[in-house]
Amino acid sequence: MMSGSAAFSEAANAGGFLLVLAVSLPTAGMLLSVLGARLAARAAPILMLAGLGVAIAIAIEVWRAEQPLVYFVGGWVPPLGLALRADGLSAAMLATTAIVVCATGLYGRAAFRVPAGVSETRAPLVFWVLLMAVWAALNLVFLGDDLFNLYVALELLTFAAVPLVCLDGRAETLAAALRYLLFALLGSVLYLLGVGLLYGGYGTLDIVLLSGVVRPEPIAFATLGLMTAGLLAKTALFPLHLWLPPAHAGAPPAASAVLSGLVVKASFFLVVRLWFDVMPGLLNLVAAQVLSTLGAGAILVGSVLALRQARLKLLIAYSTIAQIGYLFLMFPLAGASSAQFGSNVALTGGMLQAVSHAFAKAAMFMSAGLIAEALGHDRIAELRGVGQMLPVTVFAFGVAALSLVGLPPSGGFLAKWLLLTAAMTAGQWWWALVMLLGGLLAGGYMLRVLAPVLTDANEPLMPRVAILRSRELVVLALALCSMLLGILPLRPFGLLQIGRPPTSEARSR
């Protein structure tokens, strides 16, 4: 086994303190929230802006230095100590998370405010505590470099995300939260079993050290299978998606935005880490095709089920299942080695899909929430005239829909175009057909919503409650972020390549 000093050619750099701030700021917000919802609501904008600044600073530092940021906790180098590490993938996900969390906080201030004359209420207090806890856990997932501590981060994420589903305390939302919890715990058990086998076989759980010692052998394949199955349950990949639609059906829009846009991406991120960082030599043709077949099933089944929904939130939830499927098409296209993975456009396409979907889906759930508040329902057949009543909200929904369908110039279009290019270049044209069919189905279920929304009502609609323009602008900003990703030149996406393949090569020395 490699020694810590030999394996860690990356020294802890001066910017490593930013990684500590990325975790400690939302943790401080979570602890501060316990003192009261009023104080939390006032402090949240400051902490969220500070956290956003830290995430952007990490991305800039990684881009400038062209190497990962590393921080050794307590100054101890693994395997004796723990490391926080931000490569290009981590930096991109940290920035995406910070933007979506900031938008969610601004959007949720109106829905989770403490009424005047009331000292404290349960829902606002719990919302701010859980939002900050989700943010802290997500940052831990993206920065962690030890598989057991990543398990701890996943559990923190689960126990912060599940209560967001049932903030209203109704029986149906409690049942949905319980189903979510059962799937998440099943995934945790499988992941932890894999961690135990891995430690028993190789004596370390550090990603850097493991990448240099894991070989294609039975214990490695068993470990990878268990951990991947557990993570797929948390990602809601078909056919392990049964918990996701009920969870979104009754969850507050702000909670749905975080769950769909960010929480399911954490476990997907770890699948990428496992296959390409921990065990890069184990991604053979069969394994890659199995993962992508599940992704193709998610695209087709999720899209067909979305077409059949009568409620707007459920349609968006099933569309999440479909869009998650695109993420797994990158595995057979990225190549079996870390070097191929680092240079292949499939990486850029897959991760761009993850980021673009986070912005677009958060915008769509928030738009659906505003429509439901204004009308008192979200039945698709009864949305005539909403475009006149809430033009900014409907415009934001339409912009986000462009990204999900994959129409130019959106980020979703660029992501799917890169994946299509990778499929044709690799001679795997069948995945291109799946993507094209998925785009047509996505256009169908988005048209189901936009057609009645943009049709004039027989009589002008009046909202049941006043919709704040500031909330509409937050939704529009997220939708425009998903569009901006398709307009930017590809050069900034070179950030995703930092830390690979040079780092992978260094690890194997």
Image: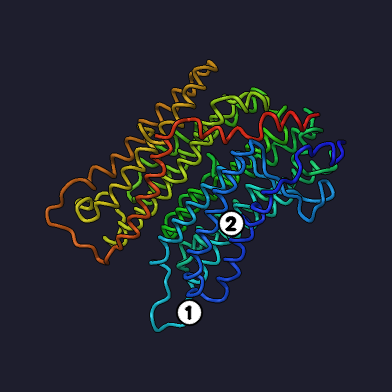
- What residue sits 65% from the left and 44% below the top? 86
Q: Which mark is residue 24?
A: none
Residue 278 occupies which quadrant of the picture?
top right
Within-10-Å neighbours for mark 2: few <14, some 14–19, many 20+: some
Of residue 25 and residue 392, the one placed in the foreground of this image is: 25
In the image, is residue 281 above or below residue 465?
A: above
In the image, is residue 408 above or below residue 226?
A: above
- What residue sits 53% from the left and 31% below the top? 348
* Mark 1 to mark 2 CA distance (whole Å): 28 Å
The amino acid marked with disc number 1 is Glu
Q: Is residue 427 left or right of residue 498?
A: left
Q: Earlier in the sequence, mark 1 or mark 2?
A: 1
Q: Is residue 460 visible?
A: yes
Q: Is residue 423 left or right of residue 200?
A: left
Q: Is residue 457 left or right of residue 395?
A: left
User: Dot 2 corresponds to which residue?
Assistant: 181
Of residue 270 and residue 489, the one placed in the foreground of this image is: 489
Within-10-Å neighbours for mark 1: few <14, some 14–19, many 20+: some
Which element is circle 1 on?
loop
User: Dot 1 corresponds to which residue?
Assistant: 120
**Farthest residue toward the left?**
458
**Rendered location of residue 134, percent (x, y):** 57, 58
Q: Pointer 1 and pointer 2: residues touching (CB < 8 Å)? A: no
**Rendered location of residue 138, percent (x, y):** 59, 52
**Rendered location of residue 153, percent (x, y):** 66, 54
Which element is circle 2 on?
helix
The amino acid marked with disc number 2 is Leu
Q: Is residue 190 visible?
A: no
**Rendered location of residue 341, percent (x, y):** 62, 27
Q: Please state, as top left, top right, bottom left or bottom right, where the N terminus lies in the image.
A: top right
